[in-house]
C-alpha cells in the first residue's frame, strides 16, 4: 500500500541527517497558489503526531512534518547540549532554505509552538498564518514540572498493552476520557519496537539534559518573539484541562496581537491531539482566513 507521504532527509549545519515527511498536495493546481504547511512537534514527539492531520490537509496543501534531532528517524545529536529550541529552529530554517520556501503556515504543538515564535522573530514575514497548540509566551510552572517527571526516563515494555497502560498511569489527568484503545494509539505515536523486541520511546533520552537547565524548557521573555507574529493571523488551541497554557496567558496574547483567535478543546489537557472536532474546525477556519487574505 502506497504511503500518503515521502520520507525525505536534510542535513543540519553540524552534519546530522534529519528526517521529514513530505505530503504532496492531492490537488496540484490549487496547491501552487497556497502556502505549504509545516507541522512542528512537541518535546518528546515525532512526525507520527501529525499523521492524520497531514493526510487531511494535503487535499489542498503541501505538508511538511520534520522530526527534530534526536527524534524518530532523525539522527541523534553527538552533543546533547544542542538539544535546545534555538538549535531546532536553525535546523528547520535550514530545511526551508533548502526547499526554497520563503513563506508558509505553521502548526506548532507545545515546543513546536515555541519554535514558531522564535522562527517569526528570526525571520519576519515567514508565516502567513499560525496555529499554536497549547503553548504560549508564558508557561505554567506546574506543567513544566510534570513534564520533568517523565522526560528522559528510559522505560521499555513487552507489549503495546503494557506500554499503553504505562502512558495511562502518567497521563490520565490530561486525557481522562481515553479508553485502552486510545492509549494504545498514543503509545504507537510515541514509541517503537526496538531490535530486541521491546517497546520503548522514540527519542534520545539525552534530550532531557538541556531541558533541566534554566531557560531551555521555555526560553526567557518570549513575548517579543510572539509579537513578531503581529502580521499573521493566529489561532490558539487550548486543552480545557491544560497545565501549560492558562486562560490568562491567552487573554494577554489577544491583547498584544491584533489578530488572535482562540478555541478551547474540551475534555483534554496538554496537548490536544488535533484529531478533535473542535481543533479540526479551528484549523480549517485559520486556513480559510489565510486563503481569503492571500
Image (tube, helix red, strand yellow):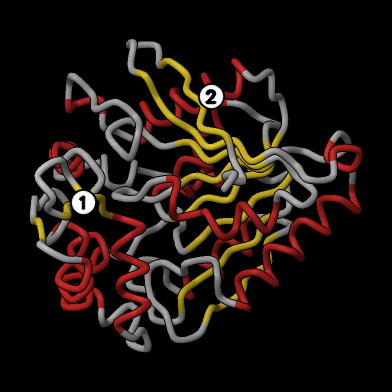
Q: Is residue 19 left or right of residue 45?
A: right
Q: Residue at x 34, y 43 (%)?
A: 220
Q: Is residue 94 left or right of residue 60?
A: left
Q: Tell me which corner region of the image, top left, top right, bottom left or bottom right, holds residue 186.
A: bottom left
Residue at image position (48%, 49%) is: 113
Residue 155 relative to residue 6: left or right: left
Query: In x, y percent, where is residue 218?
Result: 32, 47
- Which residue, given by chain and number where applicable, does mark 2 sit on? 93
Who is closer to the viewer here, 247 or 175? 175
| Residue under label 1 | 201
Residue 245, percent from left and from top: 42, 67
- Label 1: state its secondary structure: strand
Residue 287 image position (x, y, % from top left): 77, 56
- Label whose residue precedes the other's in the sequence (1 or 2): 2
Front residue (pair 90, 12): 12
How far apart are the two marked residues, 1 and 2, measured between alpha carbons?
A: 26 Å
Amino acid at each position: 500500500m502506497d504511503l500518503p507521504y515521502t520520507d525525505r532527509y536534510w542535513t543540519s549545519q553540524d552534519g546530522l541527517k534529519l528526517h521529514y515527511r513530505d505530503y504532496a498536495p492531492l490537488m496540484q493546481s490549487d496547491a501552487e497558489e497556497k502556502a505549504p504547511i509545516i507541522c512542528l512537534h512537541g518535546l518528546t514527539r515525532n512526525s507520527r503526531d501529525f499523521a492524520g492531520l497531514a493526510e487531511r490537509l494535503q487535499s489542498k496543501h503541501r505538508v511538511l512534518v520534520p522530526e527534530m534531532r534526536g527524534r524518530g528517524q532523525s539522527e541523534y545529536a553527538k552533543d546533547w547540549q544542542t538539544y535546545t529550541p534555538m538549535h531546532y529552529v536553525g535546523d528547520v530554517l535550514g530545511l526551508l532554505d533548502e526547499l526554497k520556501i520563503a513563506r508558509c503556515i505553521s502548526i506548532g504543538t507545545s515546543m513546536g509552538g515555541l519554535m514558531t515564535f522564535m522562527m517569526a522573530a528570526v525571520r519576519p514575514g515567514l508565516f502567513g498564518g499560525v496555529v499554536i497548540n497549547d503553548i504560549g509566551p508564558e508557561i505554567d510552572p506546574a506543567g513544566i514540572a510534570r513534564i520533568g517527571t517523565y522526560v528522559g526516563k528510559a522505560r521499555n515494555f513487552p507489549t503495546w498493552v503494557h506500554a499503553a497502560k504505562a502512558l495511562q498511569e502518567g497521563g490520565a489527568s490530561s486525557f481522562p476520557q481515553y479508553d485502552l484503545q486510545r492509549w494504545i494509539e498514543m503509545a504507537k505515536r510515541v514509541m517503537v519496537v526496538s531490535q530486541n523486541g521491546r517497546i520503548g520511546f522514540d527519542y534520545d533520552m539525552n534530550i532531557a539534559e538541556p531541558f533541566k537547565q534554566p531557560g531551555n524548557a521555555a526560553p526567557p521573555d518570549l513575548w517579543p518573539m510572539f509579537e513578531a507574529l503581529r502580521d499573521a493571523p493566529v489561532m490558539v488551541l487550548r486543552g480545557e484541562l491544560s497545565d501549560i497554557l492558562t486562560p490568562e496567558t491567552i487573554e494577554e496574547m489577544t491583547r498584544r496581537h491584533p489578530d488572535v483567535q482562540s478555541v478551547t478543546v474540551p475534555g483534554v489537557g496538554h496537548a490536544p491531539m488535533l484529531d478533535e472536532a473542535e481543533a479540526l474546525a479551528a484549523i480549517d477556519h485559520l486556513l480559510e482566513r489565510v486563503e481569503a487574505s492571500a
